[in-house]
Amino acid sequence: MHPFTKYVNPYLGKLLTSIKMDKQFVRGEGCYLFDITGDRYLDCIAAYGALPFGYNPKAIWDCINDFQLSMEPSFIQPSALEAAGNLAKLLIKIAPSGLRYVTFTNSGAEAAEAAVKLCRSATGRHGILSTIKGFHGKTLGALSATGNSSYQTVFGAPVEGFAHIQYGNADALEQELKRRKDFYAAFFIEPIQGEGGIVEPPKGYLKSVREICSKYGVRLVLDEIQTGLGRTGMMFACEDESITPDVLLIAKALGGGLIPIGACLSNEETYNEDFAMKHSSTFAGNSLACRVGLKTLELLLADNGKIMTQVLENGATLKKRLDVLMEQYPGIVKTIRGKGFMLGIEFRAGKSTFPGSLMGIMGEQELFTPAISSYLLNVEKLRVAPTLSGNDIVRIEPPLIMTLEQCHETADRVGNMLQVLSKGSTSQFLSYLVDSKNKISFSEVKQKRNLLNINDTSNDSGKFAFLVHPLNLKNYCEFDESLYDFDEIELAQLTDIFSDLAKPFVISGVDIVSECGAKAYGEFIAIPRTAEQLSELPREQALSELKYALEIAKNRGAKIVGLGAYTSVVSMGGLHLKDEGIAITSGNSYTVISAVDAINMAANNLGLDLCNSTVAIVGASGSIGKGVAVMISEKVSKIILVGNSNNAKIAKDRLLITAAEILKHIRSLVTEKRELQPGSLAERIAALETLPGDESTLDDFLKFAMAFCDENSPIQLSTSINDDLRKAEVVVCATSSTKNLLNEQNLGRGAVVCDISRPKNIDREVEFKRPDVLALDGGVIKVPGLPFFGWNFGLDDGLAYACMAETMMLALEKHYEHTSVGSSGVTIDSVLFLKNLALKHGFELTGLRSFDEPLDSKKLESIKVARENVMTCLVGSSR
């Protein structure tokens, strides 16, 4: 771990490392940086405008060395500061006319703080008005003036007295000053918003602002910390409209790229004795910084401001080249902004630009411009940076000394990046992030279907959301097919980065219309974690991400949320989410129905007599396993309840509860005088005189189960998968494990396996090494109308997992209550309720499927033949 990450900023350090922006630069010369490997980078950030002459300018270093030799004292307050006085005199000379005094600071943020105090003391008012997305620094007062809540809230900003209005709207300013007359001391504004996204106001805006502020006695504070000192091709950007503010802020470039210094210039009407005698700073106005400031201004003014003329001309050329790229790639580049060497490229980012792609998600989550910056750094050796508030903006702010040739070089490298980006391939664009030893051969990206949300807001539609996540790395490829270009190691590297950076997001929306005419609109919200990643996260972190997704669902109008795969597991079937202000369903009740239906369908196709069959249920203490055990007990001869072998004592206690539930259910069948399947364990248990009666509690049945469930009982308890699965003709697997629990060796001859677990618990090798085994995908449902859900999760259009289907049915019914939540939430009543809803709305099992594919008649016939052969051999060997 680099010392910066270990001791300075572990959070930023980790982020920079993950997106490969953690370069260790060891040398800087002019507009170039060199890293520890010797690679050279063209720098178009210039420390956000603080490097007017690039890295290590000789003239500034000569000034510093001369200062050392002169023996001039550095910090000598209070006294008549010689260097500070001379620098102030020159600043007033070159500043807009009317400014009279200079207060020195150590940074731009400190200059903004000084301006707040100055204006309040001058006017006797405390209100400070600034603009939305404006940026004035990160100290508390400056941060309060900064119009970005994401940087304020955690620090208790804005503090009392600060407010924000729309930038570029003079009417909004006048309305606010008129509304709160005699409240505001100052209006803070940038001539061009920098961190806000390189935003230029309409022509004449600054002049109008000047007039309005004068009209209401409000001081105009012009923040030229980033735009000033030549950045836009003029000494100050406000010269463009020939206005003079009451207060002018500068910093960054004033230190020549080597020394921190800032300044707050003010007119005579604003400067006052209270401020002058009560505001001070130990290091502000120090001799070294001011000597460097004088040298900086000397260089800027040399040859009648030649360097600024070059900035104006070269910046115009660079902008023209970028405009051409915008015309060439209109689907990606939206606008080119700014002037001089303060330029911004606004990208079209999001799912509409890159449908069915991780890049589209990155665009919606403010990750796209960091990725572009990282690509340009690593591939094109060009340093650019996103802006803090302009989420789709990349800034180009090179040193003022950048040559025309370097401007063309910059445009060429941006063009190279756009050419790759235009192919729409996530794999090609982000391939630099993975450690590929072989050159990746990129496939052609197919045209994606439009994944834009339909968003049916009609009042008669039910509203739902469903939480999904990639079960494994393959699911990322199903969503973004370009990722098939990566091998498993490369894909794991990329998705690990994505998972750590991305938040839950909406994939798509779908309208559902049932067979009885009911309507529902739902959205799929993705948690960017695989099942394995979710299982390894601390529970609180996992729940935090799920709660964030629930908040998205609520804000978008959902009334019930379904939990897919591991989102149900980590939330204990929704128990930990039931107090979040929205109805929850785990979908487990209908999953039970679909599993039992799949087993019945398979048995009919294979000629398997369930009444003479043993069923083993792996994960029988979980809500789904328990539900299947109870439901199937009516039809089979024997049940083996299999629990976790890691803690046999606890597992058997939980399995006993499942056994008690089975026994209680069978008693209810007797009470209802239901006809029982001849030969089934239900028929045999119902005949027991010792079976607890109708009024018995679950505890009574539990006590009975303790004595009843021995090795000769039709209900057996096991914690040994490898020993007991071979005894079963039918195996149901419903666990929260991410491992392969079922394999070619522990399955009996001719076994029918129904694997409901997501991710699957059956080893894929079973398909090839055990042709006698029928491996069923449990819980795949045909949705009425076969709608397209807007994304590919491994099933054909209109097919959904049972947990999804349950959520849809509850929304169609507008049954906005917690359903199937927790292990006790799956009951006979809930199962029968969902079974009736499925019949009413037209949801049904989609036929037999095996290893994510429909099981065709040819494949089924080959399994039947193989199964009959092994069963014949078994009979022969027993003789």
Image (tube, helix red, strand yellow):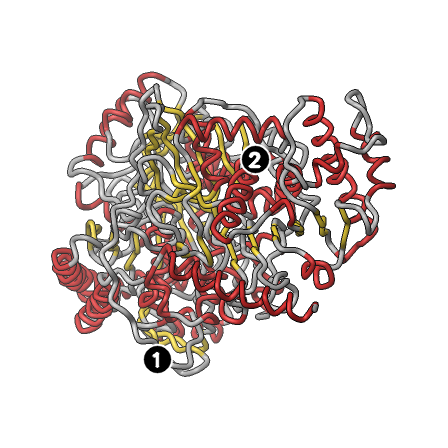
Name the spot of residue 190 as percent of width and height, x first: 31, 42
Q: Which of marks 1 and 2 is nearer the N terminus?
A: 1
Name the spot of residue 710 as percent of width and height, x first: 83, 48
- Asked whether residue 212 is in view, the answer is yes
Q: In which quarter of the image is the C terminus?
A: bottom right
- Asked whether residue 278 is in view, the answer is no
- Image check: 86 left or right of 284? left
The kind of residue on which mark 2 rests is: Ser
Query: Foreground: 612 or 202?
Result: 612
Residue 234 drawn above or below residue 453: below
- Image check: 573 left or right of 368? right
Residue 395 drawn above or below residue 807: below
Residue 823 picture quarter: top right
Residue in the picture at 71% in, 52% down: 642
Helix, strand or loop status at disc 2: helix
Residue in the picture at 38% in, 71% down: 432
Residue in the picture at 35% in, 35% down: 784
Q: In which quarter of the image is the N terminus?
A: bottom right
Query: Foreground: 326 or 717?
Result: 717
Residue placed under numbered mark 2 in the picture? 589
Please tell me how crowded label 2 is: few (under 14), some (14-19), or many (20+) other residues with Cα within 10 Å. Answer: many
Helix, strand or loop status at disc 1: loop
Query: Foreground: 770 or 8?
Result: 770
The kind of residue on which mark 1 rests is: Lys
Name the spot of residue 493 as percent of width and height, x first: 48, 67
Residue in the picture at 23% in, 63% down: 423
Residue 50 drawn above or below residue 432: above
- Pair 1/2: label in front: 2
Please tell me how crowded label 1 is: few (under 14), some (14-19), or many (20+) other residues with Cα within 10 Å. Answer: few
The alpha-carbon separation of the residues under discs 1 and 2 comes to 48 Å
Residue placed under numbered mark 1 in the picture? 439
